[in-house]
Amino acid sequence: MATASERIPVLVTPQEKALISKMAQDAHMSMGELLRRAASSFRPNEEEEILEGMIGQILKTSAQANAAIDEALAFVEDSERRIAAMESGRTR
């Protein structure tokens, strides 16, 4: 790896700096190394694709859940009608 010789000033809050410092200490590396590794592994397009896939799956399963709920409600309504008919002495 080439020797680092360029600076990128980044402003962070005191809380963010403390968190970055703790993460770097826990990983036994400098804050600069931690940030370089984090930046080099960041892939926004890949993350967007993953999120889009997750959203698609959520929409699919939500639609399936809604259909199952609708079927259950229709079954309950039919059952209530049958019970009411039996209680009133009518048959269908």
Image: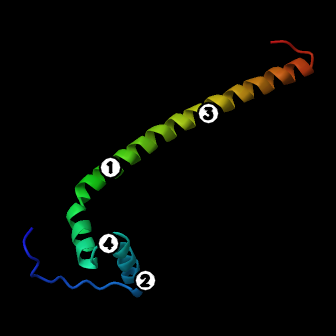
| Disc sitting over residue 15 in the figure | 2
Quarter of the figure with residue 74: top right
Amino acid at circle 1: Ile
- Of mark 4 and mark 2, the one earlier in the sequence is 2
Amino acid at circle 4: His
Task: Tell me: 35 left or right of 61.
Answer: left
Asked whether the residues under the numbered discs 1 and 3 touch, taking CB atoms below 8 Å apart as contact, a structural biologist would say no
Badge 2: how crowded within 10 Å, few (<14), some, or many (20+)? Answer: few
Quarter of the figure with residue 85: top right
Along the line of sight, the residue nearer the viewer: 64 or 45 = 45
Asked whether the residues under the numbered discs 1 and 4 touch, taking CB atoms below 8 Å apart as contact, a structural biologist would say no
- Of mark 3 and mark 2, the one earlier in the sequence is 2
Quarter of the figure with residue 90: top right
Task: Tell me: 78 left or right of 17.
Answer: right
Q: Is residue 82 above or below residue 68?
A: above
Q: CA gap, disc 3 to disc 2?
A: 48 Å
> Which residue is rendered at x = 21% and y = 85% of the image?
9
Q: CA gap, disc 3 to disc 4?
A: 55 Å
Q: CA gap, disc 2 to disc 1?
A: 29 Å
Q: CA gap, disc 4 to disc 2?
A: 20 Å
| Disc sitting over residue 50 in the figure | 1
Foreground tag (1 vs 4): 4
Residue 68 image offset from top left, x and y in percent: 59, 32
- Per the image, the residue denoted by label 4 is 28
- Of mark 1 and mark 3, the one earlier in the sequence is 1
Amino acid at circle 2: Gln
Foreground tag (3 vs 4): 4
> Which residue is rendered at x = 32% and y = 72% of the image?
28
Q: CA gap, disc 1 to disc 3?
A: 30 Å
